[in-house]
Image: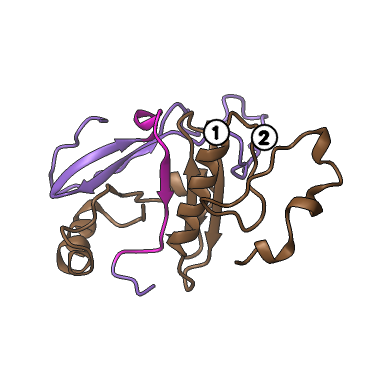
Chain colours: A brown, B purple
Amino acid sequence: MSVDSVFVHKMWNDKELSKMVEGGVPFPMLSDGGGKVGTAYGIYDEDAGVENRGRFIIDPEGVIQAYEVLTPPVGRHVAESLRQIQAFQLVRESKGTEATPSGWKPGKLTLKPGPDLVGRVWEVWSVDMESD
Amino acid sequence: MAEKPKVGCARPTGGLVGQAEPGRPKDETQSVKEVRKMIQVGKAAPDFVAPAYCKGEFTAVKLSEHLGKWVVLCFYPGDFTFV
């Protein structure tokens, strides 16, 4: 979503993005002329008249589980967004009985929060698991 | 899907769903207080309807029509930018 019109979205997709992604952008490119939606999400820059790089992960109930906001010159890292979605999906499927510690990715150890874990995370999780 | 807008020369715009347009206060003595609430994790995402371009079609997207699915909503400064 950006403040550009759907006509500009079409030209950007057809003339440039479709050269990067075969078949073009596979999801809707939304238009927010005037920044009303961006304002509600807190990412519209009124002075510049554009939206910052805001990314929101919304669950099947319509609840925001995560967001990240960057100023325009720095791009996102899509793999990190996917990792977060996988983590939120795991937590949801476990009905909140499991949690994903720092550095978690699919296949790695999850934690089961409860009285038995208090003071004993160090026994199952180590700092090198954060970045391996 | 939200209602498909007619394609014309006017630029279609969308807006928030379920929120009254801000207007003048009914009573002149009433002061206008601007309350800007930052989005919070764990809270409902503001619903909206927005014009969209998707796979060759001009259409419209309403966030609440995607309940039951995970949604990633991305904002960016502008088309044809460099990042």
| Pointer 1 residue | A92
Say which of A94 and A56 sits in front. A94
Q: How many marks can you see? A: 2
- Location of residue B26 with respect to A27 vertically, above or below: above
Q: Which residues are magenta?
A: B63-79
Residue A83: x and y, percent? 50, 53
Q: Quadrant of the C terminus of chain B?
A: bottom left
Kind of residue sitting beneath label 1: Arg
Mark-to-mark CA distance, 1 and 2:
44 Å
* Residue A105 visible here: yes
Contact check, label 1 and label 2, Cβ < 8 Å: no
Tell which tag, 1 or 2, sits nearer the viewer. 1
Q: Quadrant of the N terminus of chain B?
A: top left
Q: Is residue B3 left or right of residue B45?
A: left
Task: For mark 2, name the chain.
Answer: B
Kind of residue sitting beneath label 2: Ser
* Residue A52 visible here: no
Say which of B19 and A94 sits in front. A94
Say which of B30 and A74 sits in front. A74
At 28% across and 69% down in the image, what residue appears?
B80
Residue A27: x and y, percent? 27, 48
Q: Residues within 10 Å of mark 1 (few under 14, many from 20)?
A: some
| Pointer 2 residue | B31
**Is A131 included in the stretch rendered in magenta?**
no
Task: List the single residue furthest toward the right.
Answer: A119
